[in-house]
Image: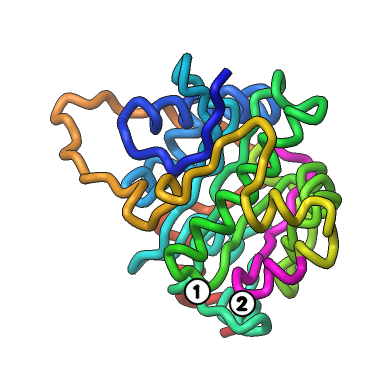
Amino acid sequence: MALRLLVAQSPAERDAARQVEAQVFLQAFGNTPEVMEQEYGPYEARSRFVVVIDDQSGAALGTARLIVAAADPVKTLLDVAGEPWQLPVADSLGTVGLAPGTVWDVGSLAVDPRYRAGAAGAEVSVALCHGLWRYARNCDVPGLVTIVDDRVRRLLRAMGVPWHPMVGAASRPYLGSPASTPCVLVAQMAEEEMSRARPDLAPALVHGMFRSITVDPADLAPSRGTVVPQAEPADRPSLPPRRDTTGWRPPTSRRTELFANPPGA
């Protein structure tokens, strides 16, 4: 395999990223294609994919979906403003010097189970973490937010990736995960934190030096990942009703209202 870390640009690269994302989330959390469409479809035009791809086959070994900031809140902030967390988002982010309209959202992180074990498999996960941080820095993004399964969060912390729980957030069931925690990463502080926590991994996490994965700075440039919105086909079939997930959240319109007017405000 000829592995490369990049921000997906071509339709084939984006499709490969979505395929491994869908495969992992179905297997790990029971999220069907219909659920994935309900949850991520509204953010498709704002999604950019950091991906480790096999240049020979075109397959993605792992990917992370970034949802960029816009006039509307990113998915994580919209979700944590409602049930079950009901966080005062602006206040929580303000404690680490961030504002809701400036952060990007790591909407998903997925690695093909076949490439999780051994040194080569670990490189895929580390490469995705490097790509997320480096691309965010290249795009002048001050911070990232996510809702991460607690098992994955423990692995990320062991790798030295500084995802910290959002102030006021506790672990709760979320979209098939029995326990997930809203977290924040301050981009400017991440390099120092990663180097201090795991100096042995700093060459990879911070500088993108890998044995089996090629990293070309041009592949993480801010110009990569943008898409031109396409008009919805007129005959697009309606989606089936959303299934009941383990973490109840109000519909998008209600979640937007909660974000703008949190309880107790």
Judge left or right: residue 138 versus residue 234.
right
Q: Residue at horizontal 65%, vertical 66%?
A: 185
Quadrant where the C terminus is found in the figure: bottom right
Front one among 259 and 100 = 100
Magenta stretch: residue 107 in it? no
Residue 97 appears in which quarter of the rendering? bottom right
Name the amino acid type tagged 1: Pro
Residue at position x 53%, y 73% from top?
142
Q: Is residue 71 above or below residue 253?
A: below
Residue 261 shows in the view: yes
Instruction: Choose between 127 and 250: the one closer to the eye.
Output: 127
- Proximity of marks 1 and 2: CB atoms separated by less than 8 Å: yes
Disc 1 crowd, CA 10 A, few/some/many (<14, 14-19, 20+): many
Image coordinates for residue 258, horizontal then vertical, percent: 50, 68
> Left of 252 or right of it: where is 210?
right
Q: Which quadrant would residue 192 be assigned to in this image?
A: bottom right
- Is the N terminus in the top left, top right, bottom left or bottom right quadrant? top right
Per the rendering, the mark at residue 93 is 2
In the figure, is residue 212 to the left or right of 194? left
The span shown in magenta is: 177-193
State the mark number for residue 100.
1
Q: How many marks are shown on the rendered structure?
A: 2
In the rendered image of this protein, does residue 153 appear above or below residue 61?
below
Q: Identify the secondary structure beneath mark 2.
A: helix
Residue 209 pos. (x, y %): 65, 46
Q: Amino acid at mark 2?
A: Leu
Q: Residues within 10 Å of mark 2 (few under 14, many from 20)?
A: many
